[in-house]
Image (spheres, helix red, strand yellow):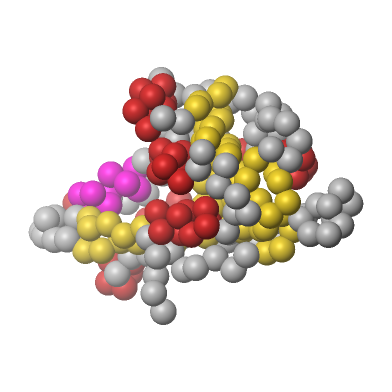
Amino acid sequence: MITFGPADLIGWLATQCGTPLHCVECGAGDAEISAFLAPRFHTVTATDLKPPRSSITAAKKARFNYLSCPAETLPFEDHSVDMVISMQALQHFDVKEHVKEASRILRPGGVFAALAWGEMQLPEAVAAEYAPVFEALEPYWEPERDWVVGGYSDLEFAGRPLSLPKARMQKQMTYDDLERHIRGLSASRFAKSAGTLPPRVVQKKGHLDTRFEVSWPVVGRAFKFVNRQQYPEV
């Protein structure tokens, strides 16, 4: 089975839309998805409650719009959008209100997609070395973490579920790289605030420059929107 990269998956989702006219990214942050999709839609709009300053330059360069607004109140007309997409953001929304708003603005045949990163995949030997680290971090994860890395499994939407192609992000790392990544995790920050830090495996290594492959599967849910009340023929 061919495994897609994240860009391949997002590009595939774009092909599932009835028409490639307007895409809206919610909780966009740096709006990497909007920049990628800009050539594939007539109009792309990134939205975020607090857009980062860097997003202004990115939007001008990639020629997409960026609006400051919540994912639960999107300033678009009814049935005027062909894709509503988010990445690693759904857990920060009022999910019920976001789904309701996406249903309002999507055209029949449009796509609703909520994507996230799954569990980090390490080589077996490295995973065994770091098992005590991740065990120590376990109590400090946000309550919704299992829902996120599980791909929002119980998410419901008014439409036909799409079977997402397998996709993952791959990266070469050293032990130093991995240590820095772990220290940047939200669970590590919460642990530090609580005065607890997991052991530093990197201090025990004599081969810090050894490189190994790390990957993160892309998980989530996607639907092809159908509004049977207003469009019974769809």
Q: In this view, does 177 lie to the left or right of 220?
A: left
Q: Does the magenta stretch include residue 182?
A: yes
State which quarter of the image contains the C terminus.
Answer: bottom right
Q: Is residue 1 left or right of residue 68?
A: left
Q: In front here: 216 or 222?
A: 222
Task: Check the image and name the residue furthest to the bottom.
Answer: 1
The residue drawn where x is 41% and y is 79% is 1
Quarter assignment of residue 84: top right
Q: Do we see residue 118 in this rendering?
A: no
Between 41 and 172, the one lying in front of the other is 41
Question: Residue, x 61% and y 58% (percent of image)?
Answer: 221
Return the residue nearer the eye: 80 or 156: 80
Find residue 118 and report its horizontal and vertical position in percent. Answer: 48, 59
| Quadrant position of residue 184 | top left
Whether residue 128 is visible: yes
Q: Position of residue 222 (x, y in %)?
A: 62, 57
The span shown in magenta is 175-183
Total number of numbered labels?
Answer: 0
187 left or right of 128 in image: right
Q: Is residue 119 above or below residue 190?
A: below
Could you say where residue 102 lies in the image, as x and y percent from the top left?
Answer: 71, 42
Q: Is residue 118 above or below residue 84?
A: below
Q: What secondary structure prevails in the magenta region?
A: helix
Instruction: Write the residue at 37% across / 60% down.
Output: 5
Q: Does the stretch in magenta take in 106?
A: no
Relative placement, left or right, of 83 versus 121 is: right
Q: Is residue 117 above or below residue 102?
A: below
**Residue drawn at x 40%, y 54% as measured from the top left:** 7
Q: Position of residue 58 (x, y in %)?
A: 37, 28
